[in-house]
Image (spheres, rainbow, N blue to C red):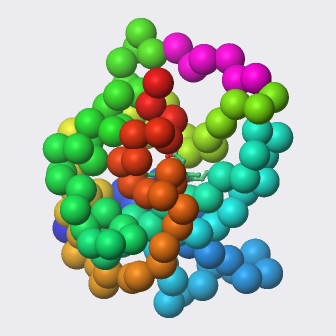
Amino acid sequence: MATGKYLVSIAACAECHTQAEKGQIIAEKMFSGGREFALPGGLLISPNITPDKETGMGNLHKEAFIARFKAYADSSYKPYKVGPTDFQTIMPWTMYGGMSEHDLGAIYTYLMSLKPIKNAVPEKFKPNAKTVAIR
Ligand code: HEC
């Protein structure tokens, strides 16, 4: 558990996965997503990664969580060229994909130990929504 907490803090997951007010992340909303990023390709919203079953990753299995990261670890993965209207992500997938399954598992276990927070994000940004970023 300590490893997961440590990894989550150095990887700055909370920075993007928590709503902020005047540049400060809101502690009560930690990891519940909903942070908006206006990008040229459109608005990107970070998903809720708390264990809430309805709006977060409560129904996401550990294997699926790890696989989501590992999909990008494969060195044959080539980022596709995004057009002006294509969906783009800022989630640093390729960087995290290099983490070991053990570390990713520790992150998952840590996140799942947190208090579930209900915060609905649009369907396409829900964890493991297949429309997001996997191509
Ligand atoms: C620079 C901002 C940023 C950082 C840092 C970041 N994320 Fe994300 N993350 C996003 C955005 C935006 C999305 C939604 C778009 C996407 O899925 O690519 C996302 C998506 C996700 C998803 C949903 C994947 C799915 O199945 O659709 C998970 C799980 C996740 N992040 C976990 C993490 C964890 C764990 C960390 C720390 C190790 C982290 N993120 C760090 C911005 C970030």
Q: Residue furthest front?
A: 123
Q: Is residue 100 above or below residue 17?
A: above
Q: Is residue 114 above or below residue 121?
A: below
Would residue 6 be found to the left or right of residue 89 on screen? left
Would residue 115 be found to the left or right of residue 28 on screen? left
Residue in front for this viewpoint, 80 or 113: 80
Would residue 71 be found to the left or right of residue 90 on screen? left
For residue 5: magenta?
A: no
Q: Which quadrant would residue 1 be assigned to in this image?
A: bottom left
Would residue 59 be found to the left or right of residue 122 on screen? left
Residue in front for this viewpoint, 17 or 48: 48
Report x, y in % for residue 93. 48, 37
| Residue at the image position 62 percent from the left and 75 percent from the top | 19
Report x, y in % for residue 66. 26, 42
Report x, y in % for residue 53. 27, 72
Q: How many marks?
A: 0
Q: Which quadrant would residue 46 be assigned to in this image?
A: bottom right
| Residue at the image position 40 percent from the left and 47 percent from the top | 129
Q: Main secondary structure of the magenta part?
A: loop
Q: Is residue 96 above or below residue 10?
A: above
| Residue at the image position 50 percent from the left and 51 percent from the top | 124
Residue in front for this viewpoint, 70 or 4: 70
| Residue at the image position 76 percent from the left and 23 percent from the top | 83
Provide the residue span drawn in magenta. Answer: 78-83
Q: Residue furthest top?
A: 76
Report x, y in % for residue 108. 25, 58
Confirm whether residue 17 shows in the render.
no
